[in-house]
Image (spheres, rainbow, N blue to C red):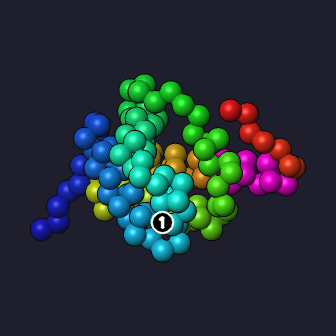
């Protein structure tokens, strides 16, 4: 008998998703080192920020008040990194959840990756710096 997965409905679901996802990210040979170099020993702080970000974006519970792009602007990342990131993200969502919010979070992650890659390419190709 197949188990029916629940949808993402609350902060506990967000925390499960974020914790599971970043555990996989840290184990990934390609993007794990990039994250570990940037975050260092601040993983609890980063995870908390990610809980608030996705809670705000997905659940309309406004707990995140930041600008997600600037911290990524100087990182040595490109489309390949986002492809791996998205693959792990989709896999994690699909393993844990099913439903409207699960579909929405994957859609939002896809759009965010497109925007980030576009901005990174713009800044790199135009010797520009993002506004803080």
**Label 1: how many Cα within 10 Å (few below 14, some 14–19, many 20+):** some
**Residue 128 shown left or right of residue 106 in the figure:** right
**Residue 110 shown left or right of residue 50 in the figure:** right
In the rendered image, the residue lying farthest to the right is: 126
Q: Which region is colored magenta?
A: 114-125
Q: Quadrant of the C terminus?
A: top right
**Residue 73 shown left or right of residue 7 in the figure:** right
Q: Residue at (86%, 49%) from the top-left corner?
A: 127
Residue on which the image places disc 1 = 32
Q: Is mark 1 on a helix, strand or loop?
A: helix
List x then y, in percent, for residue 96.
Answer: 28, 57
List x then y, in percent, for residue 115.
Answer: 66, 47
List x then y, in percent, for residue 13.
Answer: 27, 44
Q: Where on the picture, by quarter, is residue 48?
A: top left
Q: Residue at (52%, 59%) from the top-left corner?
A: 37
Instruction: Tell me, yes or no, whether the highlighted magenta stretch contains residue 92.
Output: no
Q: Main secondary structure of the magenta part?
A: helix
Q: Where on the picture, by quarter, is residue 59?
A: top left
Residue 111 in view of the camera: no
User: Nearest the camera: 21 or 86?
Assistant: 21
Instruction: Tell me, yes or no, whether the highlighted magenta stretch contains residue 121.
Output: yes
In the rendered image, the residue lying farthest to the left is: 1
Q: Residue at (17%, 61%) from the top-left corner?
A: 3
Q: In this view, does 117 lie above or below 69?
A: below
Q: Quadrant of the N terminus?
A: bottom left
Number of marks: 1
Residue 37 in view of the camera: yes
């Amino acid at each position: 008998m197949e188990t029916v997965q629940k949808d993402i409905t609350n902060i506990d679901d967000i925390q499960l998703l974020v914790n599971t996802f970043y555990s996989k990210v840290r184990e990934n040979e390609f993007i794990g080192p990039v994250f570990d170099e940037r975050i260092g020993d601040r993983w609890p702080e980063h995870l908390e920020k990610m809980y608030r970000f996705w809670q705000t974006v997905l659940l309309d519970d406004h707990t995140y008040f930041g600008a997600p792009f600037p911290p990524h602007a100087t990182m040595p990342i490109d489309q390949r990194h986002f492809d791996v990131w998205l693959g792990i993200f989709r896999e994690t969502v699909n393993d844990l959840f099913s439903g409207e919010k699960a579909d929405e979070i994957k859609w939002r992650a896809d759009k965010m990756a497109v925007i980030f890659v576009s901005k990174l390419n713009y800044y790199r190709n135009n010797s520009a710096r993002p506004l803080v």
